[in-house]
Image (spheres, helix red, strand yellow):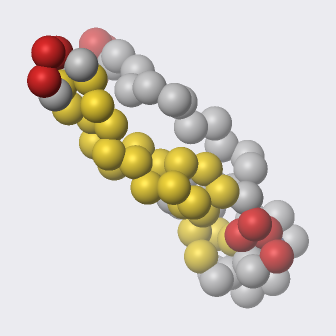
Amino acid sequence: MLCFHCEQPARGVCRFCGRALCKEHMTNRMPYIITIYVGEQNVPKAIVVGDALWCNVCKPQPEPIEMPEIY
Ligand SMILES: [Zn+2]
Ligand SMILES: [Zn+2]
């Protein structure tokens, strides 16, 4: 696989969209939300991985978006 940005051999992939990234373009990082659950007193809580690889192209949403059309 080649880097999406510069076509060098890829060393990783964007955690959000799967685009391939080389070492140089792996410098973009975003917190990655693994899951969200409702904790005590109905407070939504998120389990987040900091420092996930990000391609700088796709647009991860900070919150899950509703997708009623998939039903
Ligand atoms: Zn690159
Ligand atoms: Zn991406």
Q: Residue at x 71, y 69 (%)?
A: 26
Q: Residue at x 68, y 81 (%)?
A: 10
Report which quarter residue 19 is drawn in. Answer: bottom right
Q: Residue at x 40, y 21 (%)?
A: 65
Report the residue that reaches farthest toward the left: 40
Report the residue that reaches farthest toward the front: 41
Position of residue 9 measured from the top left corner of the image (x, y, whole percent): 73, 86
Report which quarter residue 29 is drawn in. Answer: bottom right
Position of residue 64 measured from the top left corner of the image (x, y, whole percent): 39, 26
Classify the position of the C terminus by image quarter: top left
The reply to whether residue 45 is visible in this rendering is yes
Report the residue that reaches farthest toward the bottom: 9
Could you tell whether 35 is left or right of 58 in the image? Answer: left
Q: Residue at x 33, y 18 (%)?
A: 67
Report which quarter residue 54 is drawn in. Answer: bottom right
On screen, residue 2 above or below 25: below
On screen, residue 34 above or below 21: above
Classify the position of the N terminus by image quarter: bottom right
Position of residue 51 measured from the top left corner of the image (x, y, whole percent): 57, 60
Q: 31 and 21: which one is in front? A: 31
Could you tell whether 20 is left or right of 48 in the image? Answer: right
Q: 25 and 7: which one is in front? A: 25
The reply to whether residue 14 is visible in this rendering is no
On screen, residue 26 above or below 58: below
